[in-house]
C-alpha cells in the first residue's frame, strides 16, 4: 500500500493533503500541479484543514478556480 | 379522493365507522397516505439531540426519501435531500461528524454545512475546477422545509403546509409553560421498539384512555379511568390527560426536579397527546417524552422514544427507573396494535364503531385522515 493509499485508508486527511501538496511542488508541469493542488484542496476542505484557504487562492492564481 | 368509507368516518361519532381495512393492508393506499398524510404535512423524522454538536450529520430514509439531518456551523438544524447535485449520489451513508465540507464520495463535489456548493474538482478537465454551465450558486444542496419544536425535527417535504407555528398554534399555546430549557436524558433515555403494525394504529391506541384498565393495569391502580379527560383539537391533535400524575421517587424519596414556574394544574396533571401525523407526546411536571412513529412499510413501524428532564444531570438511577417504567408501558401496547393489524385482514371488518363516550380522540384522528385524503390542505387553508 502506498503512503497515499494508507493515509486515505486511515482517513488521515491531514496526511493526504500534505502528500498531494508536496507532490505539487516537485518539478511538475502546470497541468500536473493544478491536478495535485486540486486534490490537496478538496481533502483540506473536507477535513476543515486550515490549508484549504491558501490552496484555493493558489488555484485561483493559476486560473483553475473561480474567486 | 372521496369515497363511501371516508364519508362513513366523517359522520358524527355515534354514527361513524372507523377507517376501513384498506388503510392498513393495501400497498397502494400506503403510498397514497405516505404522500397526503406524511409528505404533505409536518411529519417528524428525528430529534435535534440526534445531532448534538455542530457538524453532526445523520442520514435518514423517510418514506423512501433519502434525507440528511445536519447541525450546521452556526448550530442550526437543517434537513437536505442526501444527494449530490451532480449524479444524485448519496452523500452521507452513516452518522458522522462533518469537520469541514460534505464531500461527495463519487466525484468529490463539496458542500458547506449550509448547503452551498463550494468546490467542483476537475469539472472543467484535470485541474480545472470551474466551467461554463456549472454555476455553483444554483447547485446547492436541496433543502427540505423543517422546524424544531420540543427538540423534535418536523419536516414538510411538499413545502405546501402552513407554517408550523401557525398550524400548531393551539398546541404551542396549550403547552407554553414547557417552552423552557429541557435536557435529553442521554443514551439511557432513548430506546426504540419495532412493531408489526401500520403507524396509524399506534396513534389510535395512544390517544384514548379507554384501554388503560385492561392493557395497563398497573397504571390503573393509581390513575383510574375516571381520572382522565379527553383532549380533542379537530384537524390537529388529540389525546388524553390525567388528573392524578404521581411522580417517580427513589427509595430515599428523591424525585426529579420540576420544570420551572409551572401552574398548579401540573402538580398532579399530565397530558398525552398525539400530534398528527406521527408524533406521540407525554408531558409532566418533571419530565417530557416523545415517541416518533417512523413507518417502515404498511404493517411495520419503528417507534423512537426520547425522554427529557428539567435538570441537565438528573439522578441516573432514577432516570433508568423512569426509562424502564415507560418501556414497560409502551411494550404493553404492542400486542394490541399488532392484534389490530392482524384483525385488519378480516374481510368483513367494517372499520369498527366508536364509543361516543370513550373513543372521541380516536375518531378525531380518523376524521383528520379522512379530511387529508379528501383534500390534504383544505382544513389548513381555512385556518389561515
Image (cartoon, rainbow, N blue to C red):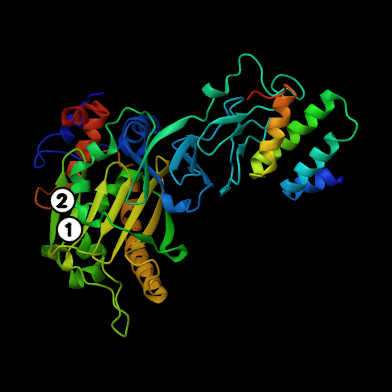
Q: Position of residue B123 (x, y in %)?
A: 69, 22
| Residue sitting nearer the eye, B218 or B314 | B314
Verify CB contact (< 8 Å) between mark 1 and mark 2: yes
| Residue B289 visible within the image | yes
Letter of the chain that mark 2 sits on in the rendering: B
| Residue B195 visible within the image | no
Q: Position of residue B339 (x, y in %)?
A: 33, 52
> Compared to B104, does B270 lie above or below?
below
**Which structural element holds mark 2?**
strand
> Compared to B232, does A62 lie above or below?
above
Letter of the chain that mark 1 sits on in the rendering: B
Residue found at the very far top of the displayed protein: B132
| Residue sitting nearer the eye, B370 or B40 | B40
**Which structural element holds mark 1?**
strand
Q: Is residue A22 left or right of residue B185?
A: right
Residue found at the very far right of the displayed protein: A27
| Residue sitting nearer the eye, B342 or A47 | A47
Query: In the figure, residue B98 lies in which quadrant?
Result: top right
Q: Position of residue A32 (x, y in %)?
A: 84, 27
Circle 2 crowding by C-alpha within 10 Å: few under 14, some 14–19, many from 20: many
Q: Residue B231: which disc?
A: 2
For label 1, the residue is: B241
Amino acid at each position: 500500500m502506498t503512503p497515499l493509499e494508507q493515509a486515505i485508508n486511515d482517513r488521515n486527511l491531514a496526511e493526504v493533503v500534505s502528500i498531494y501538496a508536496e507532490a505539487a511542488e516537485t518539478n511538475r508541469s502546470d497541468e500536473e500541479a493544478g491536478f495535485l493542488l486540486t486534490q490537496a484542496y478538496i481533502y483540506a476542505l473536507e477535513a476543515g484543514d486550515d490549508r484549504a484557504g491558501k490552496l484555493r487562492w493558489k488555484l485561483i492564481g493559476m486560473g483553475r478556480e473561480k474567486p | 379522493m372521496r369515497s363511501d368509507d371516508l364519508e362513513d368516518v366523517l359522520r358524527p361519532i355515534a354514527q361513524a365507522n372507523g377507517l376501513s381495512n384498506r388503510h392498513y393492508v393495501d400497498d397502494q393506499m400506503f403510498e397514497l397516505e405516505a404522500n397526503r398524510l406524511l409528505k404533505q404535512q409536518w411529519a417528524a423524522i428525528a430529534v435535534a439531540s440526534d445531532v448534538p454538536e455542530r457538524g453532526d450529520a445523520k442520514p435518514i430514509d423517510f418514506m423512501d426519501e433519502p434525507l440528511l439531518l445536519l447541525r450546521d456551523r452556526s448550530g442550526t438544524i437543517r434537513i437536505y435531500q442526501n444527494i449530490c447535485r451532480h449524479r444524485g449520489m448519496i452523500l452521507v451513508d452513516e452518522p458522522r461528524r462533518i469537520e469541514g465540507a460534505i464531500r461527495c464520495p463519487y466525484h468529490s463535489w463539496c458542500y458547506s454545512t449550509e448547503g452551498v456548493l463550494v468546490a467542483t474538482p476537475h469539472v472543467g478537465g484535470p485541474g480545472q475546477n470551474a466551467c461554463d454551465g456549472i454555476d455553483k450558486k444554483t447547485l446547492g444542496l436541496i433543502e427540505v422545509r423543517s422546524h424544531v419544536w420540543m427538540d423534535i425535527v418536523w419536516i414538510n417535504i411538499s413545502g405546501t403546509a402552513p407554517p408550523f407555528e401557525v398550524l400548531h398554534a393551539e398546541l404551542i399555546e396549550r403547552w407554553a409553560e414547557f417552552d423552557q430549557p429541557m435536557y435529553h436524558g442521554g443514551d439511557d433515555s432513548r430506546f426504540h421498539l419495532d412493531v408489526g403494525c401500520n403507524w396509524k394504529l399506534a396513534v389510535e391506541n395512544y390517544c384514548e384512555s379507554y384501554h388503560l384498565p385492561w392493557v395497563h393495569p398497573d397504571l390503573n391502580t393509581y390513575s383510574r379511568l375516571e381520572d382522565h379527560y379527553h383532549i380533542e383539537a379537530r384537524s390537529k391533535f388529540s389525546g388524553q390527560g390525567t388528573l392524578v400524575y404521581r411522580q417517580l421517587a427513589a427509595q430515599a424519596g428523591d424525585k426529579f426536579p420540576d420544570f420551572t414556574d409551572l401552574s398548579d394544574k401540573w402538580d398532579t396533571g399530565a397530558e398525552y397527546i398525539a400530534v398528527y401525523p406521527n408524533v406521540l407526546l407525554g408531558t409532566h411536571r418533571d419530565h417530557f417524552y416523545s415517541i416518533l412513529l417512523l413507518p417502515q412499510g404498511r404493517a411495520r413501524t419503528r417507534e423512537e422514544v426520547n425522554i427529557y428532564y428539567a435538570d441537565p444531570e438528573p439522578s441516573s438511577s432514577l432516570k433508568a427507573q423512569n426509562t424502564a417504567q415507560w418501556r414497560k408501558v409502551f411494550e404493553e401496547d404492542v400486542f394490541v396494535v399488532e392484534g389490530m393489524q392482524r384483525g385488519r385482514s378480516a374481510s368483513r371488518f367494517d372499520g369498527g364503531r366508536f364509543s361516543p363516550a370513550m373513543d372521541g380522540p380516536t375518531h378525531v384522528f380518523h376524521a383528520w385522515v379522512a379530511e387529508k385524503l379528501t383534500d390534504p390542505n383544505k382544513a389548513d387553508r381555512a385556518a389561515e
